[in-house]
Image (cartoon, rainbow, N blue to C red):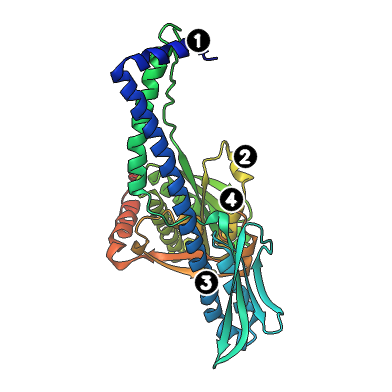
Amino acid sequence: MIDLTRTKTTLSDLLREPRRFAVVIAAGAAVITNLLIGVAWAWQADVARSEHIQALGQASAAQLATLSVEPLIAVDAIRLGVLTTRLASLPTIRLAAIHTLDDRVVALAGSETRDGGHEFKAPIEFENDTAGYARIVLDDDAISGGLSLGPVVALMAVVSIMACAFLGHLLAVTYANTGTEQSVESEAPKTVRRTYLLVVNLFNLNRVPIAERASILARCRERLDRLASRAHARVMELPGTGWLVVFETDVAAADRAFRVVLHALLGAEVLDELNADNHTGARLELVFRFGLHDMEAPGSDTELKRSDELADAVVLSAVAPDGCVAVSESTFERVLRPERLIADELTNPVLSSLATTRTDACVVISTTADTYRHALDRELHEFHEATTSSPSTF
């Protein structure tokens, strides 16, 4: 507790000295000014936030109404459902719905609760007639204000520094003889790691003749092991599916996600080469599909095998086109300069079972863009150049 008697004596001494008295007055004025600035900022931020909510809500409802004209007239409930689902997946939108003029719900996605939300409506017009209306409920908690805080923050920082300097001086005088010491422990920054999961799905494994199956699986595994050694990765068996290639990377590693995708495309090419090998037999062409997802580094392989992220990667591999890589949205967002890849969006009802990433679509990558094909060609050349080459930079 603060010794009130000592504090009173200290303040009396300060008031008897003109220079210290001036510091007290200046610091008091600084604190009051800081408080007034804070009140003004809060008021302006609230006004700006309200205007932002109105503009965003009206624009979202109008956009949904515009996009819903054709499918509503055609009574296409599937397309209307896709529109509302995609809009409701945005963090700022709690609910998106399409209604007919008699208020019958045609499509709805999201939560009906309106606590902490604002509702907006827009008519759906076709040839000057109203066919229904679009309804949007915004999530206020997910919407920030649009106030520019730069000048305000700079001024508040200057005022706060002045007030803190005085308070520090006052506390130093008040507790000069207490002998109180404080130690500050600094914690070393921890290395954060991200794990990428590449599922290699031999999609027509059950059609491979039993007599050839062991030999083909061994040849696939041998190529995947060589690929993994180049990428500082490791290969695990996935019974009934194929294999899992685990890429463990430092979050600070430059362009890590693109390198993982590049090695996934390399895997697609080197495995497809098996179809040109006489040992695979001319009766059956092997079909490989690839699913790529990411997760925080698991504590053990047991945790990895039981993770929802691995289950989602298997689902992605199941919907991937032959020889392509189906990438989760969370992984694709980590790729720097995605224009280096040939990518397209894929929708499939099976994706609704995903638990840790976007459930209505994924990204399918078929190869690199022409201007970056040299990177993949170089990796492919080095892969064939030697079976025990040094691991590539990852």
Report x, y in % for residue 168. 38, 21
Q: CA distance from mark 3 to mark 2?
A: 49 Å
Name the residue that disc number 2 marks: 302
Give the mark nearer the N terminus: 3 vs 4.
3
Q: Is there any visible trace of residue 307 in the rendered image?
A: yes
For label 1, the residue is 5
Of labels 2 and 1, the one closer to you: 1
Label 4: which secondary element: helix
Tell me the residue that label 3 is attached to: 58
Secondary element type, mark 3: helix
Quadrant placement of the N terminus? top right
Q: Amino acid at mark 3?
A: Gln
User: Gap between marks 3 and 4, in whole Å?
Assistant: 40 Å
Local crowd at mark 1 within 10 Å, few (<14), some, or many (≥20)? few
Among the two numbered marks 4 and 1 on one chain, the one whose residue lies closer to the N terminus:
1
Camera-near label (3 vs 4) is: 3
Amino acid type at circle 4 is Leu
Q: Earlier in the sequence, mark 4 or mark 2?
A: 2
**C-alpha span from label 2 to label 1:** 64 Å
Residue 334: image location, x then y, percent: 43, 53
Instruction: Quickly name the residue at label 4.
Output: 310
Pick the front one: 344 or 261:
344
